[in-house]
Amino acid sequence: MPGFIAKRKKVLIILSLFLLLFWLVTLQVKNGRFAFLEKPVLAVSGFFERIIIWPFNTVASVGNRYVFLVRTERANERLLEENERLRLENGVMNEILLENERLRDALNFKRLHPPSSVMVQVIGKESSPSSSTITINRGSDDGVEKGMALITSAGVVGRVQATLPGTAKVILLTDPASTLAVRVMRNREEGLLEGKLESCALKYVSYYADIQEGDLLVTSGLDGIYPKGLAVARVVKVTRHEASAFQAVVAEPAVRLSRLEEALVLLK
Amino acid sequence: MRPRVYLMVVLLLIPLQASFLNPLSLGGVKPDIALALLYIIGLLTGPIEASLAGMGIGLLQDIGSAGLIGSTGITRGLIGLFAGLLGRGAIDINSPSNSIFLAACSLLEGICSALFMQVVYGSVPFGSLLIGRILPQAIYTGLLGAVLLHFLSNKDVISGLVRHAVQKEL
């Protein structure tokens, strides 16, 4: 027996490592994802990502500033940022209008306020086989904290998962670990939107609920992360099975996540 | 390979995959450079070392992403093992069929991950995932692997590494 073990030492080590990883995974399925080593890995990858993206940004920046007019470029940047903010405010205002129409007689109704935000640039897009995350160029130095929402004028992008000074990791809407409380804008039906990598699935929608293809899903504000009324996704497929109490609803994110370059982090 | 080389490769892989390959993205699909590199490591070093490298790379990718820690470690470890066995007795490193095997590895890993997600999170849209993400990435990764191997063989890097590996074995 000892001879057999000595002969197959390397194979046994590999086998035990596989078993160890399998045990780690099963533990997380039961208790939730471990966060150990997350920050050191983000620190190293964020550092290298900034170094890698720096030459691209520098070349682009030099081209923009000297090939085109300096003032025009700056004004454009400012206007773009302002436009993002105004579109966000407009989205929230529309939601307030809808609420007011339904509840115009109600007094002391809590009003929505667009929260303060910080503009961020995407410096890394990670696409592991089982998750969807991005790295942004702002972190705890700029007031970005874990759990904050990341949005664009088109809608919700995701939420901050980990932060460091100068960088943060964001879990996208399509990540399987992402869940978001949403509401159908047309008829206020509620549900939970889960990431499915390429798309999202609206869960726990009753078999009898009126959900149609093309319906816009907006944040309900019930999860305490996203403000109420932000566009999240659009329903692309609805399937009803008589054996199930719920409908199977597939939705595409409102934001083109594959083309994301800039976004806003909503500061609490 | 030396542990220092491994450490450097592994530390650079995550930011390389996340930032440097963005310009190569087609419709949101990027080639998997970590997998291509792991396959080459497997062909050059053998099943044990490649399996360990795969577990290390996968584990770091898991920590750097939002997935369950260990899931990619397992799949990448198995791919390293497979590539190592392939390199030991079945396939020549300069063979053009390497890109097909690499694409097959990527495809298998994608399918395994989707099945794993089905078990953990439930109701995964398998068809759209396969057509929209897994299959294009597998083809893209296979092509990247072919380019990498062609580049390495032209620069006589492979023969040097193989010589080093053989010397180590002796």
Image: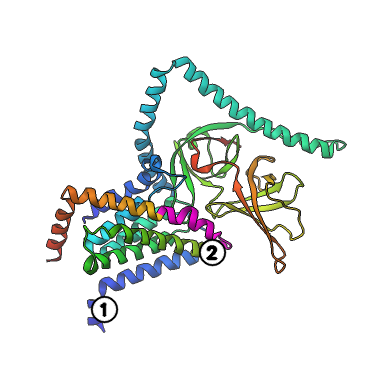
Q: Quadrant of residue B54?
A: bottom left
**The C terminus of chain B - image quarter:** bottom left
Describe residue A187's horizontal placement relative to residue B18 as left or right: right
In the rendered structure, does residue B130 fall within the stretch colored magenta?
A: yes
Q: Nearer the viewer, residue B139 or A112?
A: B139
Q: Amino acid at mark 2?
A: Gln
**Mark 2 packing: few (<14 Cα in 10 Å), some, or many (20+)?**
some
Q: Is residue A62 magenta?
A: no
Identify the secondary structure beneath mark 2. helix
Q: Where residue A151 sits: x, y (%)?
A: 58, 38
C-alpha separation, residue under disc 1 versus residue under disc 2: 37 Å
Is residue A164 in view?
no
Q: Residue at x 22, y 61 (%)?
A: B45
* Residue at horizontal 64 percent and vertical 46 percent from the top: A234
Image location of residue A94, percent across then percent down: 73, 34
Label 1 sits on residue: A5
Q: Which residues are magenta?
A: B121-137
The chain letter for the residue carrying disc 2 is: B
Tell me: residue B80, above or below residue A155.
below
Task: Give the residue at mark 2.
Answer: B118
> In which quarter of the view is residue A256 placed?
top right
Q: Quadrant of residue B78?
A: bottom left
Q: Position of residue A219 (x, y in %)?
A: 67, 44
Q: Is disc 1 surrounded by few (<14), some (14 to 19) or many (20+) residues within 10 Å?
A: few
- The amino acid beneath tag 1 is Ile
